[in-house]
Image (cartoon, rainbow, N blue to C red):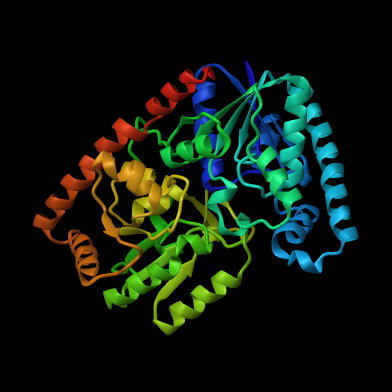
Amino acid sequence: MNIGFISTRIFGTDGVSLEISKIQNLLIQKAKKVFFMAGELDPIFEKQENGYCFEKMHFLNSEIQSIQKTLFENKLETITTKQMQECWDKIDQFANEIEYEIEKFINKFNIHKIITQNCLSIPMNLPLGKAIYNYLSKTGMECINHNHDFYWERERFLNIKNQNLQDFLDKYFPPSIPNMKHLVINSISQETLLKRKGISSVVVPNVFDFSQKEKFIDEYNQDLRESLELEKDDIFILQPTRIVPRKSIETSIEIVSRLKDKKAKLIITHSSSDEGDDYLAFLQQKAKELDVDMRIANSRFSETRGINQNDQKIYSLWDAYLFADIILYPTLIEGFGNLVVEALFFKKMVVVNKYPVYLKDIKPTGIKFIELENNQITDETISQIKEVLQSKKDPILKKKYDQIIQKNFEIGIQNFSFEILSEKLKEIGLI
């Protein structure tokens, strides 16, 4: 069977791209052939000749961003009737163009079934949503729609005052058509999707391949700390997230400040490219005010190892986990939380804000982390963090935390492994 993945972007270390990679690997193990279509693709797909790129599918395409700005950012009372009609005409035009390219992709690779990845969940590209809907409605092709986050979970897509726009979102994000099965990544989304749209779905949590060999410091990554200009006795505090407001990196800056240790360095592995640089500027100012050494190292980390445009070594995200002394995750909202599952595998302690999905689907499994309540940093929080950091030198504390993270690892196998993913894909008839 030939299976085609369709999304806005299939590249890098964002949550959607990472989950695509995991499903792809499992499908290949089950003798399926996989192909990829998006507005931005990992270059490896070109080498493997199994990718199809069409730029207007990307949410960062300038023409798509112009549509988004008109409908979601500008005040509607400032938009003339003519400008609004031109915007809707563009959506129709681009949807037709994208639908044509989808048909070419399907025919080129003889696709039997498609998996849409979050592009019918959150309206980052309105023409793409309409194009996929139209193609599926005309052809009846089977589709698995994998929803990571819905528009009603993001503040900027709420309180729509234009009825035509609201009707558009209701129809296409996500659509309800007989040849489409829906996946969600948490039970809250499952309940909400059923309540709001009458659509049933299967919960597929973020997973990790816990059966793979344990990763170690090796010849390639042994110089990672040196590459990040960390001294031997510096404390490597890691936040491996994108630089966007909902990741609440300012909370991490405050945590590092309250440790009152000049050796504590906050390392951020991702960029701010998705949502602009205003938030990054705010964080840099806050770090300066609190005298926190925060380092943005996105140019040195990617999904896989390699060389960047400055001929510097690129490390994998997993390399960062290996060297981290502790991981901070003060996120406000997540569809699930890849970081949590990854930390379980790498046996790292996490400081986590108790965001809704964590409370509903993750905490009940029994994992033990340092938890924040609404990102409030207490003296007890700082004391626990210091204890984790001290466990590197204190045998008694080391034994305590080794037992905790080993138990976390075992819980990860039981609840968030590839075996769980395999069971879910069997349930929907994909394997």
- Of 337 and 288, which appears nearest the observer? 337
> Where residue 284 appears, x then y in whole percent?
50, 76
- Residue at x 77%, y 31% (from the top left corner): 134
Q: Quadrant of residue 323?
A: bottom left
- Residue at x 31%, y 33% (from the top left corner): 413
Q: Quadrant of residue 378?
A: bottom left
Q: Residue furthest left?
A: 396
Q: Quadrant of residue 38?
A: top right
In the displayed structure, 248 sits above or below 357; it is below
Say if residue 105 shows up in the picture.
Answer: no
Say if residue 393 shows up in the picture.
Answer: yes
> Where residue 370 appears, x then y in whole percent?
26, 57
In-image side of 284 versus 163 (left or right)? left
Count of number-bearing discs: 0
- Of 395 and 360, which appears nearest the observer? 360
In the displayed structure, 333 sits above or below 421; it is below
In-image side of 223 versus 74 (left or right)? left
In the displayed structure, 21 sits above or below 370; it is above
> Where residue 6 appears, x then y in whole percent?
67, 34
In-image side of 45 versus 363 (left or right)? right
- Residue at x 49%, y 40% (from the top left corner): 192
- Of 394 and 143, which appears nearest the observer? 143
Q: Residue furthest right?
A: 82
> Where residue 368 appears, x then y in whole percent?
23, 49
In-image side of 76 versus 365 (left or right)? right
- Of 175 and 60, which appears nearest the observer? 175
- Residue at x 52%, y 31% (from the top left corner): 183
Q: If the image is split into quadrants, where does the N terminus sit?
A: top right
